[in-house]
Amino acid sequence: MPSPAFKTVQQLSADIAAGRLSPVDLVEDCLSRTERLEPKLQAYATVQAKEARLAAEAADKAIRSGHRIGPLHGIPIAVKDLVEVEGKVAMGGTAAWKDRVAPHTATLYRKLVAAGMIVLGKTHTVEFAYGGWGTNQKLGTPWNPWDAATHRTPGGSSSGTGVAVGARLAPWGIGTDTGGSVRIPASWNGITGLKTTIGRISVHGVLPLSPTLDTPGPITRSVADAATLFCLLQGADPLDARTIGHTDCDPWPTLRRGVKGLRLGRFPAAERAAVDAEVLAAYDRSVDLLASMGAEIVDLVLPMSFADLGAVNGRIMSAEAYAALADLADDPASPLDEDVRPRVRAGASISSRDYLTALVQREQLKRVYLEATKELDAVLTPTTLTPAIPIASIDQNTTPGMATRWVNFLDLCALAVPNGFSAGGLPLSLQIVCSGYNEAMALRIGWAYQNATDWHERVPPMAA
């Protein structure tokens, strides 16, 4: 049988249900690919091979005996190393926590296991999830699978999950997003990433960077798979007060309605100068395609530039990160990534007045944005400003999140989907931004786009 690694979760689930594929064979295929490719890719912080094989055997016996839990029983998944499992080490991307044992299990992890999924391992992350390039000095920087010759940015902070899913080591995975950390890896690895609204998915048991902004989300190879994982993970959790009171979301009834009649906001002209020409060309083609499918494209004027919105987002992030991590960041003996340490320490210079002012400003600008976009169903932008760049070219004093940070700041949701390739064969990405708690609309637009294109089906050279 051909490798199941190149199938979506929807296809794998159907194969298991029909008896064409067993969880044992599926997990073994993932682990053998990981064993072969991982020495260069460095996607995983830890691979749970023994546990995954045991879980696959149990799932196989249960399914063959007529005790299938549901459509995700026996499906493997990769999980970012911010997600805690009681009694297991959760490093959060830092060597300083290499022996840190989690005191409890994340709610989202419990949901994965309850659905019968099999965790293949914990994936690498930028230290403390604080960085968009995807680098990690101490624990290793995952290798972007679209270029075997040059080590390029995998995107951060969910770098390992992006590479694992992109390189077909796992069919899907879990990331977190504080300023673009699901969408940037999705963009640069040629896959799909959903940034959820705060309160949609519980953050209980997920190591925090900025509690005001942190959101877990799916990293997958198709919009349909993103919708499936989102449906499983979202919902109220008494251990996370922000999830209480929000209406649960089922995107499937609206997923296939297409884009005809929708009003979509165009990337502001003032923002285009900062974007690579190939990224802009792919973006414009995407907008034209959606227009040809019946969407109305509307020019958008925002109250502040993306960079200015992102800067306020950065102040909130820095202040909250320093409040949690000051002891480590201020100790010169702590084995921190020296690209990340100054980001954390920057929070020391943010006064309580500046921090509280940023929070007030956030609420004001959220209202202004909602007024400016009240007639729109979504806003379309590039996800990243460039294709993945060589690691050697990174300026660590900059961020690749200009087009993503503002989404977190305004408490919106967004979907990143592949929308083309550079002349050098590197993936490009379209970002679909919707109002908070309107993930169903973002998924609907993304599903229509992916059904009209095949960019998401392309496979990186290192995965073949």
Image: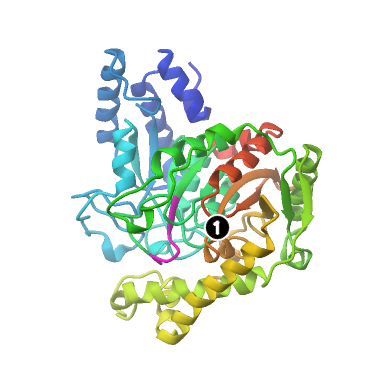
Q: Give the range drawn in magenta.
A: 209-216
Answer left or right for 361 relative to 370. left
Q: Can residue 351 be seen in this view?
A: no
Which residue: 29% across, 49% down?
106
Query: Residue 127: where, in percent of width, then height?
Result: 39, 63
Residue at numbered disc 1: 412
Answer left or right for 444 relative to 259. left
Q: Is residue 48 visible?
A: yes
Answer left or right for 307 relative to 206. right
Which residue: 34% across, 63% down?
94
Residue 181: within the magenta? no
Main secondary structure found in the magenta portion: loop
Query: Residue 343: where, in percent of width, then height?
Result: 45, 75
Query: Residue 92: where, in percent of width, then height?
Result: 34, 59
Q: Quadrant of the C terminus?
A: top right
Residue 214: within the magenta? yes
**Colouring chosen for the image of the structure:** rainbow
Look at the picture and state if 22 lies above or below 155.
Answer: above
Q: Hey, what amino acid is under mark 1?
A: Leu
Query: Residue 282: where, in percent of width, then height?
Result: 75, 48
Look at the picture and state if 316 lies above or below 186.
Answer: below
Crowding near the residue tagged with mark 1, few <14, some 14–19, many ≥20 C-alpha atoms within 10 Å? many
